[in-house]
Image (cartoon, rainbow, N blue to C red):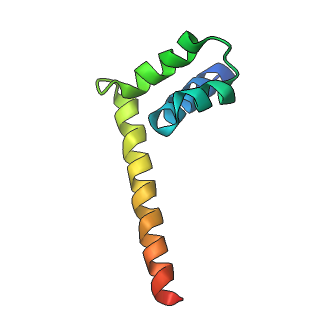
Amino acid sequence: MKTVSFHALRHTFATAMALYTPTAVLQKILGHSSWTTTMKYVHIAKSESIGYTKYLKSVYKEHRDVEKLMQKTLLKVV
C-alpha cells in the first residue's frame, strides 16, 4: 500500500474544493494569507490537461446528478 502524506491529502482537498468554491472562501478555509497561494489551487483545478482534475469533476457531476434524482424521488413520495 502506498503511503500518502498529510500535505498530499491537503493539496488534493484544496484542488477539489477549488472546482466549485469561490476563491475568497477557499482562501479562508485553507488559511492562506496570500491570494497567490490560493490561486495556485484554482489554476490547477481549472486546467483540463490534468487527469485527476477531470476525474474529480466527474465525481462531483455524478454526486450532483444523484442528489437531484433523490430530491425528485422524495418529492414524488411526499
Residue occupying the far left of the picture = 49
Nearer to us in this view, 55 or 73: 73
Indicate the quadrant containing the N terminus: top left, top right, bottom left or bottom right: top right
What is the total number of numbered labels drawn onto the structure image? Answer: 0
On the image, the x and y values in percent for residue 15 come to: 50, 28
Q: Is residue 46 left or right of residue 49?
A: right
Q: Is residue 65 at least partly visible in the picture?
A: yes
Q: Residue at x 29, y 23 (%)?
A: 49
State the image quarter where residue 36 is shown: top right
Q: Is residue 1 at least partly visible in the picture?
A: no
On the image, the x and y values in percent for residue 55 come to: 38, 39
On screen, 72 above or below 13? below
On the image, the x and y values in percent for residue 16 come to: 50, 34
Q: Which residue is drawn at 42% across and 19% down?
A: 43
Q: Residue at x 70, y 22 (%)?
A: 31
On screen, 58 above or below 77? above
Nearer to us in this view, 39 or 2: 39
Indicate the quadrant containing the C terminus: top left, top right, bottom left or bottom right: bottom right
Q: Residue at x 44, y 56 (%)?
A: 64
Nearer to us in this view, 43 or 24: 24
